[in-house]
Image (tube, rainbow, N blue to C red):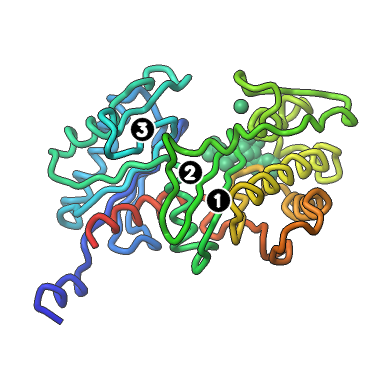
Amino acid sequence: MSKDQAQAQQNPPLLGAIEAGGTKYVCAVSREPSEPLEEVRFPTRNPEDTVAEAADFFRQAEKAHGPLAALGVGTFGPARIDPAAPDYGLILSTPKPGWSQFPLLRSLNEQLGGGIPIAFETDVNAAALGEAVHGAGRGVRTLAYITVGTGIGGGLIHDGRLFHGRLHPEIGHLISPDLDGPYGATAQTCPFHECCLEGRASGPAVAARWGQPAEEIPAEHPAWELEAKYLAVLCVQLTAAWSPDLILLGGGVPRQEGLVERTRAEFVALAGDYWDLPTPEDYIRRPELDQGAGIVGGLELARRLVL
Ligand code: ADP
Ligand code: ZN
């Protein structure tokens, strides 16, 4: 081992992460992705003030812990995450006031003095990477990570690499068959599609259909039978298109007691035995890092910049 390597092992570089959500920003620093050292969270306001608050945190952290070696950002989207694109680092058209076309990466660079390498990803991709490397997806070759919360999003990982495609996957907008009929009520919260999974099965979609917040709907309510059917459709689509080894159902809605179990049962009924799959318990699971996945993934993105 060289002297430099020995030194690096004694004091690994300081990594930073931002989970740039539509409602809140979480910033963290650490020397080890799976164990954030210091963390702060604050509401997402207008872009300039929000970025300034994040930059303040990192400047303070540098005073306490030494210079930041790299930063990993996972932002709400849509966002340009292709480093080769001329508008890399931009937030694209979003209903969030003030944020459409905001150059988030450039603004962070400016606020931090320009000397720190920054990895720029979507929030769901960062969370997917966190689970893949440090959570429930450890050792899994092809992972589909889904979050069912205020929206529905998903990230795909193969051999440790995030799939981008032309922009990035928008798994929540997979079109579903309309399963509402027997339940006597319809709610469609996606303004773009008549029947996509986000519009029918996200937390706000469930709340809109049944007239109460999703977390207050009791376990025996038919809402959860219907929700399990929609999530099973999602798992079948992912299986058909991507052939993952593991599907993780993250986000607030699958916290509902029994929902993941019901989704597995509906999945088996819908998929039949066409695919040679692991047992449903091994194939469709909850994440391990859960709400920490975004920050751990952001730190992992930063770590990869300084390897
Ligand atoms: P976000 O998507 O904003 O990051 P979450 O993943 O926590 O946040 O998801 C929030 C959504 O999850 C809300 O719509 C909320 O109603 C729903 N939710 C939270 N807990 C539960 C629960 N135990 N059962 C069902 N829905 C829940
Ligand atoms: Zn949609």
Res. 15 mark: none
Q: Nearer the viewer, mark 2 or mark 3?
A: 3
Q: Amino acid at mark 1?
A: Tyr
Q: Hey, which residue is sitting farthest left in the picture?
A: 3
Q: Residue at x 25, y 45 (%)?
A: 118
Circle nearer the N terminus (2, 3): 3
Q: Hey, which residue is sitting farthest bottom in the picture?
A: 1
Q: Is residue 116 left or right of residue 273?
A: left
Q: Is residue 209 left or right of residue 9?
A: right
Q: How many marks?
A: 3
Q: Quadrant of ligand 2?
A: top right
From the top left corner, tell me how far across and down residue 269 is, in percent. Answer: 83, 52
Q: Quadrant of the N terminus?
A: bottom left
Identify the residue under disc 3: 80
Res. 145 mark: 1
Identify the residue under disc 2: 124
Please say if the residues under marks 2 and 1 sit with CB atoms less than 8 Å apart.
yes
At mark 2, the secondary structure is: helix
Q: Amino acid at mark 3?
A: Arg
